[in-house]
Image (tube, helix red, strand yellow):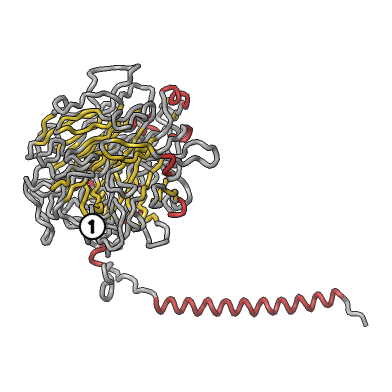
Amino acid sequence: MIDDPRSMDAEDDAIIGRAAWISAAVLLAVAALAAVGYLVTRPRAPAAGGAVQGPPAAGAAAALAAPPPLRFTDITASAGITFLHENGAYGDKLLPETMGGGAAFVDVDNDGDADILFIDSTTWPWRPRGRATPTVVVYRNDGQGHFEEVTAAAGLGERFYGMGVAAADYDGDGWVDLFVTGVGAHRLFHNERGRFVDATARAGLGDGVGRWSTCATWFDFDGDGDLDLVECHYVRWSREIDLRQDFRLTGLGRAYGPPRTFEGDFPALYRNDGRGRFTNVSAAAGVEIRNPATGVPLAKSLGVAPADYDGDGWMDLFVANDTVPNLLFHNERNGTFREVGAEAGVAFDSYGKARSAMGIDAADFRDDGSLGYAIGNFANEMMALYVSQGPGRPFEDEAIQAGVGAATRQSLTFGVLFADVDLDGRLDLLAANGHVEDAINTVQPSQQYAQPPNLFWNSGATASATFVAVDHATLPDLFAPMVGRGVAVADIDGDGDVDVLLTAAGQAPAAAERPDARPPLGAPAPRGRGGQPRRDRGRGRTRRRRRDPPPARDADARLPVAVGAAGHDRARRGRPRRSASDPVAGRRRAGRRRRGDRPPHDDYRGAVAGRITPTEPSIAMAVPKGRDRRWSRSRITFATGAAASRGTPRSAPRAA
C-alpha cells in the first residue's frame, strides 16, 4: 500500500508542532530560573529616603565628593593688561576670523617671572582700519603680577595674521625662543638676551609662505637630544577660495562655514640639525597623509600633542583634525612615523564619525599610568577624552563616564588644558568656549556666541566619575561668558597658586587670579621667587628641581592656526607627573630610552612634548643626557590658536 503524501505531511507537522511546544516550555523554564536568580542576587535598592543600605562600596565617598571652595578674581585691568585681539572681520565672514587669540606665559627676559605673549591677528590688506598692531605683543611681569607692555623694546614689531605660538630654547643658549604660526606666514624669533630677532630664513624655515599654519610644538622625535619642530596646517585658503564657498544660514545670509569643501594641508616636520638650523623631513618621515579617495592632503589640523603613548621611550604625535579623522603617528624609532589613528581608536567618535577637533591636551590625569587625550569639539559634539586601556589595546572615549561628556555637549570648545587648579595633586581640566557665529542665537536658541568656560574638578581615580563640573554660579569672574579660544595657567605673582589666562577672538582676554590660595596638607610647598630652574647649556634642556611653583602652561584651543599659551621657565610647582602639556611635569621622555636607563619615578612613559592650539600647554620633557645616563627635564612651552567656523547647519560642530 502506498502511503498518501498528504497524510505523511500532516504527521510530520504534528511531530514538529509537539517539538516546538516542548522547546518553548524549556526556554520559559530557563528564563524563569534566570529571573529568580537575578531577584535573589541583585543589589539592594535605596531606601525611601535615598540612603544606600549596608556598607558603602569602596570609592563611594569619592563618588559623592564635591569640588572644594575656589575663588578667582578678574584682575585683567588691575594687572595692566590692555590687549585687544584684532581679527579683521568686516562682514565677508572669512574663515580665519573665527580663530586666533593665541597666548603664552614665557619668561622672555630670564628674570624668573611669567611674562605674557599675546598673538594678534590683523586687519586684511584689502580692508585696513584703525592702527595696525604688532603680531606678537609682550607684557613683562614685575614679579608681583603686574604687567607692562614692552613689545617695541623686545624687538617684536612684525605684522602678519598671527594664530599661535610655541616657545622653547631650541638652540640651548638658555633663552626661550618663539615660533609663531599664522595665515600666509610663520616666524621663528631667536631670543638674544631679551630682544628677539627674526631667524626664520637663516634657520631654514622659509618655506611656510602662503600656507595657513595653526598649531606647532617642540619635541625630540629622533632621540638625539635636541628639540625638533612640528607645525600643523589647516586648509588651503585664500580670500577667493573662501568667498566661492558661499556658506549661508537661514535668516542671516553669508556665514562662517565648515572646512569640508576646503582642501586640507600636510603637517610639516622640521628636524633640528644643530647650530640653529632645521631641515624639512615631512615626506621622508611619513607625516604627509593623503585622502585615500581623492589623493589630496587629508589633515585639517587645529591641535597637536606629542606624547609617548605606548611607553617605548620614543615620542609619538597626535594631530587633532577638523571634520576629518584625527591622526596618531607612532614613532618607528628610525626617523619615520606610521599613522595608526583608526587602529588605536582615536580617529573617530564611537559611531565611526569624524568630529570637529580643535584644542588638545594629553596627561595621565588619573595618575595610574594611563594616558588621556582631551580634545575640544564643536557644539553638539561633546568633548572627547580618549584614554589608553593597556598595551596592545585601543583607546576608549571615556568622556561620558569620566563626567565631561554631557556637560560639554552644548559648548563649542576651542582650548583645553589639564592643570591642578586647587593644588590637591590631581590634574583638573579647563576648557575655553565660544561660538564662531556672532548671530548664532537667532537661528539656534540653545547656542550663544559668548560662552562661559568650563572647569572640571578631578575627584580622584576611585570616584564613579573622575571629573565633576564646577557650578558656573560659584565663580562669576572665571566663568564670565566670552568668545573663548585659549587658556593658559601660571603663578604670575609668586604666591604658589594657579592663575588663569583666557583668550578670546576679537575681544579682550581675561586674567583671573586665585587669591590667598593655600596648598592642601601634604602638597609640595611652593618655592619663592629666585628659585629658578638651572639650565643645562646645550641641546635645549632645562633641569628642574622638584619644588617649583605651579607650571606655566597653555591650553589647547581649536583654531586653524595655533593659538595658545606656552609655559615659562619658572612656573612650575614640584607637583609630580602628568600633563603632556606641563612645562615641567615631565612624564614622557623626549629621547630614546636606553637599556638600563631609569627615568625619574614620576616620568610618564617617556617625555612629553608640547603642542599647540589656541592656547597650548607647555611641556616638560625628560631626555637622556650624555654619558652619565641621567635624565634631565627639558622645559618647553607651546601655544596654538585654532578657530572653528561654521555656516550651513552641520551635524559635527567644532571647537573654538
Quadrant of the rendered structure where residue 475 is? top left
Describe residue 23's horizontal placement relative to residue 499 as left or right: right
Label 1 element class: loop
Residue lying farthest front? 627
Q: Residue at x 13, y 35 (%)?
A: 109
From this viewpoint, which residue is outermost toward the right?
1
- Residue at numbered disc 1: 629
Going 44% across and 48% down the picture, which residue do you hit? Answer: 339
Which part of the image, by quadrant, shows the C terminus?
top left
Disc 1 residue type (three-letter): Arg
Residue 597 showing in the rendered view: yes
Residue 468, image quadrant: bottom left
Is 645 in front, or is 218? 218
158 or 493, nearer to the observer: 158
Q: Quadrant of the N terminus?
A: bottom right
Location of residue 114 in the rendering, given as x and y in whole percent from the top left corner? 14, 40
Asked whether the viewer can see residue 614, the reply is no
